[in-house]
Amino acid sequence: MFRPQNDFTYLMPAHFGGGKFDPETIVTQRSTSLVLSYETDRKGLENYIPEGFELLAPEVQVSFSKFTEINWMQGGQYNLINVAAPVRFHGKKDRLDGAYTLVVWENKTAPILGGREQTGIPKIHADIEDLHIVRPHYATTISYEGNTFLTMDFEAAGPIAGEELDVLKSQFASVNTLGWRYIPKVGAPGAELSQFVLYPQGVEVESAQAGTGSLRWTELTPMQNPAQYYIINSLAALPVKRVTQAVLTEGRAVLHAMGARVIE
Amino acid sequence: MFRPQNDFTYLMPAHFGGGKFDPETIVTQRSTSLVLSYETDRKGLENYIPEGFELLAPEVQVSFSKFTEINWMQGGQYNLINVAAPVRFHGKKDRLDGAYTLVVWENKTAPILGGREQTGIPKIHADIEDLHIVRPHYATTISYEGNTFLTMDFEAAGPIAGEELDVLKSQFASVNTLGWRYIPKVGAPGAELSQFVLYPQGVEVESAQAGTGSLRWTELTPMQNPAQYYIINSLAALPVKRVTQAVLTEGRAVLHAMGARVIE
Amino acid sequence: MFRPQNDFTYLMPAHFGGGKFDPETIVTQRSTSLVLSYETDRKGLENYIPEGFELLAPEVQVSFSKFTEINWMQGGQYNLINVAAPVRFHGKKDRLDGAYTLVVWENKTAPILGGREQTGIPKIHADIEDLHIVRPHYATTISYEGNTFLTMDFEAAGPIAGEELDVLKSQFASVNTLGWRYIPKVGAPGAELSQFVLYPQGVEVESAQAGTGSLRWTELTPMQNPAQYYIINSLAALPVKRVTQAVLTEGRAVLHAMGARVIE
Amino acid sequence: MFRPQNDFTYLMPAHFGGGKFDPETIVTQRSTSLVLSYETDRKGLENYIPEGFELLAPEVQVSFSKFTEINWMQGGQYNLINVAAPVRFHGKKDRLDGAYTLVVWENKTAPILGGREQTGIPKIHADIEDLHIVRPHYATTISYEGNTFLTMDFEAAGPIAGEELDVLKSQFASVNTLGWRYIPKVGAPGAELSQFVLYPQGVEVESAQAGTGSLRWTELTPMQNPAQYYIINSLAALPVKRVTQAVLTEGRAVLHAMGARVIE
């Protein structure tokens, strides 16, 4: 019969085995990212920030990333759309600033499962096109079962260098990614497990381009996207008042896979 | 700021809202299933049955299902491969027989997330072809990123009727599906949450065909399937001694979505 | 060395072999179709009807079909969107009425190649969702690399029976599908091969539902769909003045695969 | 009514318009290629070389390429597997050496259509994984509806430089790609159009890596791949006697899209 080992960590199905817990486990991957942040309505955005957090700025941070040469996927790849907002956590023990993850769409399921169950990143699935590139134009489309709900466009103006690049490198070198790990009760309302998790992540930016960017959310009906329409429509209802950052980066991510912790 | 409501149930991301917990929530869907069970080596199979369960027979139950007209997916559809073994649970409070879910592959992510987090069914992703049908032949192929790991074939011999159909209807009318909901600790080995869950499910079989069936597991390397190879290879290592059931059914599933409970 | 056989028919690559030409070759498949026809602007539609044809009515006929159990695909399946207009061909030898095929989208490549090269049906690729069904509602979405360009909706009002069903059966039993087989010159403008082809097709309708339907074309940019945007935008520019037929059918298609002929 | 313009070139559907024929049309794209050539049995390979060609060496040339930033696809991308053999064409007018294209698999339909109809390259569809990269290992899998039929592996030994790189650049700078454009008669055996086409292509290799490579063909049944099984099985039956070239290149392709011509 199967019995879990005390010093192992598992994901479902656990009974086929897990891996020895190693706090030094490193995730490495190449990363191409298109970052588009914009100012929005504070009241509207605060509706989606849980109690215990303070919204530091009425800003939605959307980034497309293509990850390749991912070591834990044996060199495989996937695309994601990360949507976050800048917050401060006011806990009983912890007080820190970070990026609260509103939602992440990914086009592969394996990283979705680990992200949700290990670190509370609310990952869900969508089709995410690789960047279409007609230099200096870059574009991507995100859709669900053929229904477009997000498009992102970028026009590069030129490479970022010198001090400006240093600032950017520093911005991306370490991000306090914050998630809310929530597992419901079985057969009852409420949570069986509800924890805020800090997962420090970062990208070593190697090169970057400045430019102008835009994005467009398209509302979907329940028939078009039964499990996500309300998420998309909530985001689509937040006005894009002003793009505050538009940048395209190339780099390498090195993550301490086991470096997350519950914050209280 | 967002605050969860006491009588609601949520999935990540919780902060965009959930649904009022309703114990009467019904899931309905059409179901076409190809069931292939086989006798295998008892010792080998027991390696994947957790302590607390007793293996009732050295049998692996594999079924392909195509679900359509799924109400909670607004009429959408997906395919799955369910792999289970017949067990008896010997708990402190509960003692019951059921089908212990070894692994489930599905070709859509949304039902994977709910299945794992709500009821502990260890669902993971694969590409699962719709049945190719050249009557009386039926076939499907299951693969990961282009790497075939399971094929199933069935040759129908004719409809099942009369008393035999009644027995079959009764077999599928209610199944004690058993899962192990396991959520790891953050930043440490071991489980933050570890529960066995009973989720009674059933299909109203409307028609069925008897026939002969076969399946073939193909081992994969970590490079071909980094997150699942050990699961596939564990199953591939279990001998197919004798096919004990091969049947194709059409029917309708009606599930009490909130009817699962933790067993102890 | 490879030499083609005189009594064989081939598709590229020819050198791996073809099949003996058999005028009795039969294609069989199951078919579920959603037919939505609408009145549009005559002048606008005539722009896309080649000289030699007369537009019989300012009508665009759009149909979604899911074909399954396809014999020449060994029981495989695909979805298509057929767009046609009712015409009369005034040739030197031939004079006949039929449905001129404006464009067909299919979600598998194999039938696209045969359709284009063997019978001049202008098939191109798109993602076409299986019908989402929440009775009595049916819906599908057609997209290209995540960019939605057509949605179709149908609400069934009830089965068609009696004389009305007979009329419908007769309408679908044989359709004079007309295509324009056009192969360009190599290294020069103009056609190396330009032929109009008649391919009689038909479906044995077994059951049908009446109802109300709607469709919506969405314009795309070249960046969203470089090879098809002008086709989509041409169709999107034609007004949907009035839906003239909305029907959902189930049936079986039996085609004489070699029954097409060039018309002059 | 639609009338084609004399100085235009068209693809089906022609009636929505084509483009002015421009002999200077340039196709540009980024290219990452894994080239694996091997010696095989001469008699076996000659079975697939049409009369009029002489097989110069019993060699099968297989290459995976990922094309990105493709100008005519507005910055889109696709993957292909090219299979060719070195030949000499002995025509009435033309005598030249080149690579006879046995078959090409691509994972997008648009370039398949143009390649077949414009230049006689026998392109068909398959799923082709992007390279999985765990330096120095590279791997890809090619499959059809989940059935693996080709895997390619490469282990890089180090960059190619100096004179060796010059030789490689020169090898790839211009390739006489040869295709057989074959369009069948309608309603009769034999060809309506049968032409050999020369399409000079080339890649400006920017960097390259030497290494060791291997590939494996897997036979498929008609049920697994109804339209291609005999092609795959023909190639799988040719022995891989010795890998004669294994190289990974990065570069840029610049093609004269209208630079092909019929050879006689």
Image (cartoon, coloured by chain):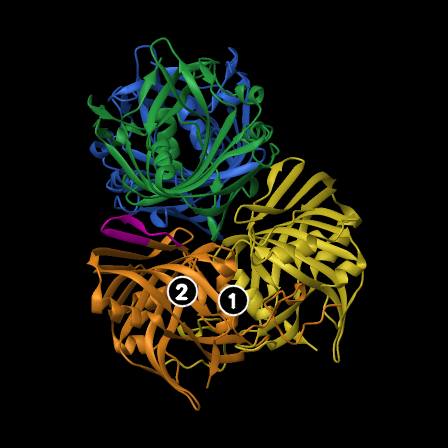
Chain colours: A green, B blue, C yellow, D orange
Contact check, label 2 and label 1, Cβ < 8 Å: no
Do we see residue C212 in this rendering? yes
Give the main secondary structure of the magenta stretch. Answer: strand
- Residue C52 image position (x, y, % from top left): 75, 73
Residue at 37%, 53% (x, y): give it: D147
Q: Over which residues does the magenta segment extend?
A: D128-140
- Residue B75 image position (x, y, % from top left): 58, 35
Q: Residue furthest bottom?
A: D92
Tag 1: residue type?
Gly
Callouts 2 and 1 on one subunit: yes
Q: Residue furthest top?
A: A92
**Secondary structure category for the residue under label 2:** strand
Q: In this view, does D144 lie above or below A261?
A: below
Identify the residue position indicated by label 1 in the image.
Answer: D114
D137 inside magenta stretch: yes
**Quarter of the figure that contains the C terminus of chain B:** top left
Residue toward you, D57 or D118 = D118
The tag on residue D253 is 2
Chain letter for the residue marked with disc 2 in the picture: D
Chain letter for the residue marked with disc 1 in the picture: D
- Residue A178 image position (x, y, % from top left): 39, 23
Tag 2: residue type?
Ala
